Image (cartoon, rainbow, N blue to C red):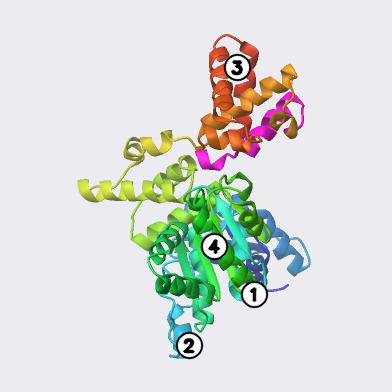
Amino acid sequence: MADLGVIWQEAASQLKDTLPKAKSQWIDRIFFEKDDNGTLVLSLSSPFYKETTEKTCRTEIENTVSAIAGHDVKVEFIVNQSRKASPKPAAKAQKKEKPAEPVSRNTTLNKQYSFDNFIAGDNSSFAFNACKVIAQNPGTSFNPCLIYGGVGLGKTHLLESIGNYIDEHNPKMRIIYTTAESFTNEFIDSLLSKERISSFKSKYRSVDVLLIDDIHFLQKKDSTQEELFHTFNELYDNHKQIVLTCDRPITELTDITDRLATRFRKGLNVDLQPPAYETRMAIAMQKCREKGYSIDQKVLEYICQNVSTNVRDLEGALTTLSSFASLVGKPATLDIAKDQLRNFIITPAIRNSDITVDMIIHSTASYFNIKDYDIKGKSRNKNITLARHISVYLASELTSYSLSEIGKMMNGKDHTTIMYSVEKIKSILGTDESVKQAVEAIRSDLVNS
């Protein structure tokens, strides 16, 4: 009979290569314990690890082990608290092999961000893998690239991870990471003299990699958009890598010139969604290790079950509880967590930036069995007009856009027309049950999706 210990080693290697990141991260925490009369006994260091692994990976583990063994193998999980995950190869060993020269010139990068400490789940694996490919082949793959999503979902982390990876493996490359706001301020300052504007253009048009965060800040800044347009063309034509982030899809940016928006869209556009529970747990445990927080497992589970908006809120909840425990001199219990985190929990799970106007239009059109373009059009059909009013009302309620911005996304309708739609729905919600049901159904569909 084959050695189950050897079979597990081969299975673990295969699983780490084939499973998505949210699941493969658990494989390093699993240890071969024994062969119990043909049953493969695997151990984990805590009840939580055991329970999570059984829920997320049992089927894949049993199938892989059985395939390698050539027959069905029963797998049993147990808890062995003496077990600890094997440490990853130390970065120091790699640094010793790295030549002392040339020294990096890329001082704008924050070295705390890397691919190694980004936990990718189903919500972010596409963006994560795309960014790794870009970092490994700058200027040749997915150029330009736009990463968009709500606050606190990891856009900046991925953006700077690209820069740090390139900086480590190609230190001769010139990399600039900046925010759209800093780019704008620097451009304004350069206008004071010909020498400054020349220096500004030379700085940004001679880089190998340009990383710009929060390009939604460029809205209504026509001169800065003009400068970025020419910078973009110069870099793109010379096969230099461009990566941008935004808080929404390019189609929903108002007051951005068409020619610049077209260039943003011409490459890879990828979105980040809020992480699932398993990914939130993995992130929370990593944050606790990094910051030295000591938080009970059940409290961590409570946090991750209830704080589902983004990583920033999750980290804020962990910091709040850890600070409380430190100040009062006692561990944070589940009751304390419920009391201290009530503001985090009460905050709606779906933030304004997570729901787009296009999503609202699509959900409303589906509810009324009409086409999306009907809502944006000028039809006076009673059914379509009502759907249009509801779309505008929900856009004003569920997004952070102003009424003027919503109007522009509704085929250029003016502020007064949009305001009329909002007030129209407000006035009949209390008297027309069918309208109330429609609004609630569409809102529920948007939030649940």
The residue segment tinted magenta is 352-372
* Gap in angstroms between the C-alphas marked 3 and 1: 54 Å
| Total labels drawn | 4
- Taking depth in this image into account, of 299 and 340 the one nearest to the observer is 340
Q: Which residue corresponds to mark 1?
A: 239
Q: Which residue corresponds to mark 2?
A: 98
* Gap in angstroms between the C-alphas marked 4 and 1: 16 Å
Picture quarter containing residue 76? bottom right
Quadrant where the image shows the C terminus: top right
> SS at mark 1?
loop
Check if mark 2's residue and mark 3's residue have beta carbons within 8 Å: no
Mark closest to the chain's N terminus, 2 or 3: 2
Check if mark 2's residue and mark 1's residue have beta carbons within 8 Å: no
* Gap in angstroms between the C-alphas marked 4 and 3: 46 Å
Q: Amino acid at mark 2?
A: Lys
- Taking depth in this image into account, of 149 and 54 the one nearest to the observer is 149
Residue 436: assigned label: 3
Task: Name the residue rendered at 43%, 44% in the picture.
Answer: 303
Mark closest to the chain's N terminus, 4 or 3: 4
Q: Is residue 232 above or below residue 288?
A: below
Residue at the far top in the pictured view: 431
What is the crowding at mark 4: few (fewer than 14 residues within 10 Å), some, or many (at least 20)? many
